[in-house]
Amino acid sequence: MNEKTLDEATKLLQELIQNKCVNPPGNEMKSIITIEKYLKSKGIKCKIYESALNRGNLVARIKGTGKGPNFMFGPSHVDVVPIDDEEEWTHPPFSATLADDFIWGRGSLDMLFIVAVQTVVFAQLKQEKYKPKGDLVLVIVSDEEMGGKRGIEWMLENHPEEMKCDFAVSEMGGINLSPGNIGFMIGEKGAVWIRLTFTGTPGHGSVPYGSDNAIVKAAEASKRLFDYKPPVTIRYLNHIAKGFAIKPFARFMLTNKLTLPFILKRMLNTNPEMAKSLASLSRMSISPNIIKGGSKTNTIPALAIIDIDVRTLPGQDLDYIKQHIYRALGKKLAKEVKIDLLHEEGFFSYGNESSIKSIYVEKMEKAIQKINPQYKFIPLIYPGATDLRFLRKLGVECCGFALMDPRTEFGELINRIHGNDERISLVTLDYSLVAYYYLAKEVLS
């Protein structure tokens, strides 16, 4: 690519940040129209599908000859998460300030920079009159941060013909783990939101002795769930150890079920973000995040609920989740708890992954090796959930793809997602433009 495309991607990213498409409520049509205007300025037609008031999704296509796979840039989302405290930011979170060779702002990393890169590279290929063997499809969506009901899920239900593809790339990837070893998210953990309900017997608050208090049960359950350690899975840590070029003895300690807890505990003091990431990649996690109960200060509560966020590795289903919730609670509380899935209020997906041996992995590695012949593709599992889970369910090969600034450390990068001072470097933007351009040519030529 060149300085012109970097400048265009920078300005497009800044406008997307400034559109402030915080979800809820989203109002993503602002950014959908921003992208439409950019494409129109290049003479490119696109389709906008309105999924709700002020919400929509965009599709643009470079038609192929029919002799190759269909390749999707996306689904890539333009909604962003809310801000807790703007005063904690170095620059206002929706100013899209360019300072110190970074673009600062909510959504810059998750994942508006990829939206900008994909859009600009798509336009570049179209203007070159590129004739791919298969279709190249640009898909920009809403509502990823709240589960995708008005975004990718809505598109698959209402316009499935637009979503047909063999290979798709979206967030996240291109993370420098160690010199030459680049991590790409070939899969992700599942996200299952669950409500635990405990009941008690109402009574007067002045006589609590021996009372059947629902909040006390919920409080004990929360502590038990927080402290519980599900079984360790080493498989994904082996990839991490390879990516970080960890020395043999340390690698043994990290990838051994008996020594891993000791290593993580020590690492929590020296490199807390890395410790959290490795712990997440080694087992199912259970996080009690909301607790409610009681109606009046002088009344012993008869009802209390806990909403928990469960993140599963590939292969762990609902039976597995329930088994370990009961085990964490212990026999007494397990008999009293009622378990419900929060389908309508949040996420529900199982851990999912694509093949690390597919031809598309080879294509991605070839693309980044055009930038640096020493680069190697290291498969990773993303601890969060992305829209790619919907496509994997349909048999589409998917991967998170970008190429990050080598100066950005893994733990620092993970900490910026949904965090204060979220930002992306111009180097990342530039590298990702080149990587996407080469990848399109590798897959479709």
Image (tube, grey):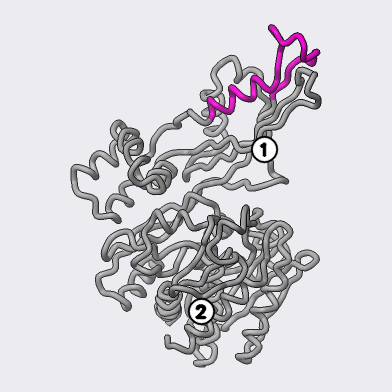
Residue pictured at 65% horizontal, 20% vertical = 216
Residue positioned most to the top: 210
Marks 1 and 2, Cα distance to the nearest angstrom? Answer: 40 Å
- Please name the residue that numbered disc 2 is placed on: 134
Question: What's the magenta region?
Answer: 198-225
Q: Nearer the viewer, residue 89 or 386?
A: 89
Left/right of residue 77 with respect to residue 410 in the rendered view: right
Q: Nearer the viewer, residue 93 or 337?
A: 93
The amino acid pointed to by label 2 is: Gly
Tell me if mark 1 has few (under 14), some (14-19) or many (20+) residues whose alpha carbon lies within 10 angstroms of its own. some
Measured as percent of width and height from the top left, residue 91 is found at 55, 66
Residue pictured at 64% horizontal, 20% vertical = 217
- Mark identifier at residue 443: none
In the image, residue 214 sits, relative to residue 61, either above or below, namely above
Number of marks in picture = 2
- Please name the residue that numbered disc 1 is placed on: 341
* Residue 394 visible in the displayed image: no
**Residue 168 shown in magenta:** no
**Residue 201 shown in magenta:** yes
In the image, residue 94 sits, relative to residue 272, either above or below, namely below
The amino acid pointed to by label 1 is: Leu
Mark 1 or mark 2: whose residue is earlier in sequence? 2
In the rendered image, the quadrant that contains the C terminus is: bottom left
- Secondary structure under badge 1? strand
Q: Nearer the viewer, residue 140 or 363?
A: 140
